[in-house]
Image (cartoon, rainbow, N blue to C red):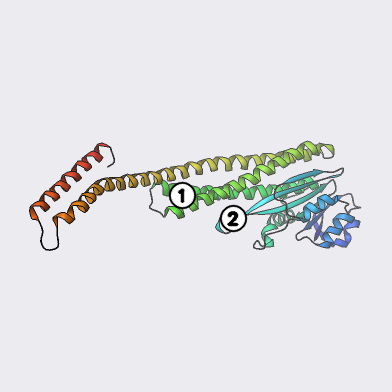
Amino acid sequence: MDLRWVDASGLTTHSVAELSELRQRDSGFVWLDVPVWSVDAERLLSEEFGFHPMAIAAARDRNHIPRIHVYADHVFLVIHAPEIGKQGHVHYLELDQFIGRDFLVTVHGPLNPVVPLEVALQETRQVIGRIEAGRLHPTSPFALTYAIVSTIVRRESALVAELARQVGLLEQRVMAAVDDDPQKFLTALFTARHELLTIHTMASQGGEIYRRAIILGRRFTTKDSITLMKDLLDQYQRVTHISQSQLGFLTGVTEFYRARTDTKMTIAAERLAVIAAVTLPVTALSSVLGMNVIVNDHTRWPALAVLLLAMLTLSLILLRWAKRQGWW
């Protein structure tokens, strides 16, 4: 666990043993960051802060959707950040927040074993770096969580921008009619769609959580805090709308590619139908009459000539009929 004191002078690091003393101060606020859940963390949140057992359980366990609980002196929020893994799988990086008037507790939710801890901590570390560099001066826990969540939303926006670049390259290949393996190309299209859809879902749900936080937060937060949460809602809505429009564009590219592929298959099926229509009667005729024209000891040449002429005539008639049907 990492304990920090944030005030007008910046940010200082302290041991967890100093938590009670720090909470007695009135010139700043406490920031407790829990990278990995532990028994000590659970005891601290329960005994020192007095958080509700249900909120502590939610911080300990994995949450598959965002959530919000408002209490008398603080609000509990669960949001997610995306991390694209192998084969298009998008990991949900959970961040739980207990936000009060004089404290902020951030808990990084359970991680998939394949995701490094550094990936989950990148937003909080970026904010720490900005504070230490003097570029950020949070004056309240809500201002600090605003900086952290804004960093998460920027990550989502950057991922949407990167996926838009990939979709543009896929669209170029579709319009240029590049002869790709259809299965691999469709996999690439649907992988991009899945990644965009996941980010869109995260942004949409995150926006709904902050929409609710704005309504409920008026009980104990300041006007400035409400303004910050409204801005977070606007950021989430922007990512939601951009990702939705990009999903629409990708759907159009995918439908165009599939329509062209289906058309090719239809044309191929029509040509196979022509081949079958031409060869089947000829095959039937030759099967029935061939054994009666060509025998083991000799060939009946006049009858064979008549048979070949009949087969040729029948093939030409069938080809002409197929042409009139528009099959080729």
> Is residue 8 visible from the viewing direction of this image?
no
Give, as a three-letter code, the residue at label 2: His
Separation of marks 1 and 2 at Cα, in angstroms: 19 Å
For disc 1, the neighbor class at 10 Å (few under 14, some 14 to 19, many from 20) is some
Furthest-left residue in this view: 302
Location of the C terminus by quadrant is top left
Where's residue 35, x and y in %? Answer: 75, 59
Q: Is residue 309 left or right of residue 149?
A: left
Where's residue 247, x and y in %? Answer: 54, 43
Q: Give the labeled residue for mark 1.
A: 170
Which of pointers 1 and 2 lies earlier in the amino acid sequence? Answer: 2
* Secondary element at tag 2: loop
> Is residue 95 visible from the viewing direction of this image?
yes
Q: Nearer the viewer, residue 213 or 91?
A: 91
Q: Which mark is residue 89?
A: 2
For disc 2, the neighbor class at 10 Å (few under 14, some 14 to 19, many from 20) is some
In the rendered image, which quarter is residue 256 located in?
top left
Q: Which mark is residue 84?
A: none
Where's residue 237, x and y in %? Answer: 65, 39
Residue placed at 74% from the left, 41% from the top?
229
Q: Is residue 233 above or below residue 61?
A: above
Residue placed at 57% from the left, 59% from the top?
86
Give, as a three-letter code, the residue at label 1: Leu
Q: Nearer the viewer, residue 309 or 269?
A: 309
